[in-house]
Image: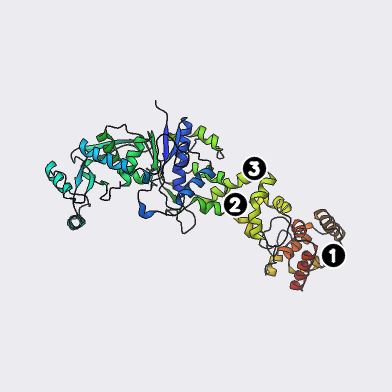
């Protein structure tokens, strides 16, 4: 068997949809599992959709996520150019060749005629479809029109009799009636190819063995097969993957901030966790393991694990996986990655090392840091109801007593660190003969104004420093008095 070759063929739209990244990942995993090559091809034939910087974003994302391509516009290769807009001559040549082979024909129908045709079909309740008006023009008629400079397109020629069957590695054998297939335009009047045509020509010329893509292309695949047959080319293995949907059944959406790779990196998900999660989104390795390195994914990946049903995107699961990755980071690595989030959360000067120790176990995704540490710069305006805690047996009344007792011993501290704060408060607890919570809970609330905080009273006091802590405890006393 020839060496496996898969490609990722994104259109430069300006952002990397999670579904596209998953397709890119599956193509990578499959080809690497088979010991093959991975090709990046930029599908930019639709120049109207050109977005500045979009191609760079593709390169950047692939690099960041570790989807290293063996061939592509930025790394070269034997089958270039790898950008479709640089291959225009090729498509015209192949379209003309296909006409000669009987798989396509010149069509001179103008816009007006096509619109009338569509209207007629709509009136009759028919599915819109080219009516074959130019299919049987004679050679002479065609030549005369070409000589006269009439604008034309080249359309795929499909014999309406019989059926076409194709095999998909995920969806199995699919058969369609040829009469249902539209004779689509392959080459437009401006000489540019349509997506459908360029894609097939390039997959063939670039010797792609496995075509992995979203199943929105499933219905066009019989037409691609007919093109391969007309050219006498070998048909690649098709691997169509089901869409990713939300629990609500809706699509991932750019507006709701859950559609693109950047949406998730912006929320502080780690690239490796994103890759790990989307690998499992529609593919099952069959087993209990859920955390995989890229090498492990390559080793386990197989087409048979790809699911036919739509994959439900579960951000909670992603967050859980992300948490697992965060836990695996060393404290130094964590601090480094968390730093921009600490900076976002806190303007005051605080010891990032201490913060890192406090947050390492408590972070699922970095964006949570901002909310968890929002009390450090400024004490939030809190309700005294927070002093009520069933388990700690505290209420606003006994909390006032506790704060009043804690204030002088803390004020008397010369050295302010976790150890000294700890010792002082526990001495007080012992002296008063009360439960820990009776002192620690009120202090924690007074310091943070929150019921959930990373770390308890002692860690928070240490972080805030003496002056600020004393001031906040005094505020608490005031509030409760
Ligand atoms: N350019 C197409 C897209 O971005 C590629 C589809 C395919 O992989 O064939 O959807």
Query: Residue 298, image x and y in percent?
Result: 51, 34
> Which residue is painted at 42% across and 50% down in the image?
12
Neighbours of disc 2 within 10 Å: few (<14), some (14-19), many (20+): many
Q: Nearer the viewer, residue 65 or 19?
A: 65
Farthest residue to the top: give it.
1
Graded by Cα atoms within 10 Å as few (under 14), some (14 to 19) or many (20 or more), the crowding at tag 1 reads few
Helix, strand or loop status at disc 3: helix
Expressed as whole percent of the image width and height from the top left, the position of residue 289 reads 55, 37
- Is residue 458 or residue 325 the one in the foreground? 325
Residue 133 in sight: no
Viewed as shown, does residue 386 lie left or right of 77?
A: right
Judging by the rendered image, the residue that carries numbered circle 2 is 365
Identify the element where label 1 is drawn.
helix
> Cα distance, mark 2 to mark 1?
37 Å
- Element assignment for label 2: loop
Q: Quadrant of the N terminus?
A: top left
């Amino acid at each position: 068997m020839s060496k496996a070759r898969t490609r990722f063929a994104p259109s430069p739209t300006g952002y990397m949809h999670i579904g596209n990244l998953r397709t890119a990942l599956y193509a990578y995993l499959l080809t690497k599992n088979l010991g093959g090559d991975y090709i990046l091809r930029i599908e930019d034939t639709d120049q109207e959709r050109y977005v500045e910087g979009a191609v760079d974003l593709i390169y950047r994302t692939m690099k960041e996520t570790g989807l290293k391509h063996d061939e592509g516009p930025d790394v070269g290769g034997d089958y270039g150019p790898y950008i479709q807009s640089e291959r225009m001559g090729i498509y015209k040549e192949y379209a003309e060749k296909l006409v000669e082979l009987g798989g396509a024909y010149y069509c001179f129908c103008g816009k007006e005629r096509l619109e009338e045709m569509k209207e007629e079909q709509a009136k009759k309740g028919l599915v819109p479809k080219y009516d074959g008006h130019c299919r049987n023009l004679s050679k002479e008629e065609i030549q005369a029109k070409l000589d006269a400079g009439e604008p034309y397109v080249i359309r795929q020629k499909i014999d309406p009799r019989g059926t076409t069957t194709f095999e998909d590695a995920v969806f199995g054998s699919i058969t369609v009636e040829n009469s249902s297939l539209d004779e689509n335009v392959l080459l437009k009047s401006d000489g540019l190819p349509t997506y459908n045509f360029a894609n097939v020509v390039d997959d063939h010329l670039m010797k792609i063995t496995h075509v992995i893509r979203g199943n929105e292309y499933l219905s066009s695949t019989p037409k691609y097969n007919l093109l391969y047959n007309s050219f006498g080319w070998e048909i690649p293995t098709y691997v169509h993957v089901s869409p990713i949907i939300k629990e609500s059944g809706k699509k991932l959406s750019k507006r709701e901030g859950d559609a693109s790779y950047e949406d998730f990196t912006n929320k502080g998900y780690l690239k490796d966790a994103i890759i790990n999660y989307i690998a499992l989104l529609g593919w099952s390795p069959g087993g209990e393991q859920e955390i995989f390195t890229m090498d492990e994914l390559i080793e386990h990946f197989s087409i048979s694990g790809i699911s036919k049903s739509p994959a439900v995107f579960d951000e909670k699961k992603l967050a859980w996986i992300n948490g697992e990755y965060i836990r695996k980071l060393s404290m130094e690595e964590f601090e480094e990655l968390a730093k921009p989030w600490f900076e976002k959360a806190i303007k005051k000067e605080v010891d990032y090392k201490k913060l890192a120790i406090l947050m390492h176990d408590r972070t699922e995704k970095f964006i949570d840091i901002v909310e968890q540490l929002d009390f450090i710069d400024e004490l939030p305006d809190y309700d005294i109801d927070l002093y009520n805690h069933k388990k700690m047996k505290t209420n606003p009344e006994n909390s006032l007593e506790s704060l009043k007792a804690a204030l002088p011993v803390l004020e008397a501290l010369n050295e302010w660190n976790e150890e000294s704060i700890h010792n002082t408060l526990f001495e007080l607890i012992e002296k008063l003969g009360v439960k820990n919570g009776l002192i620690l809970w009120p202090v924690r609330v007074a310091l943070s104004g929150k019921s959930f905080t990373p770390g308890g009273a002692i860690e928070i006091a240490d972080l805030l420093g003496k002056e600020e802590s004393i001031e906040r405890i005094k505020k608490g006393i005031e509030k409760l008095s």
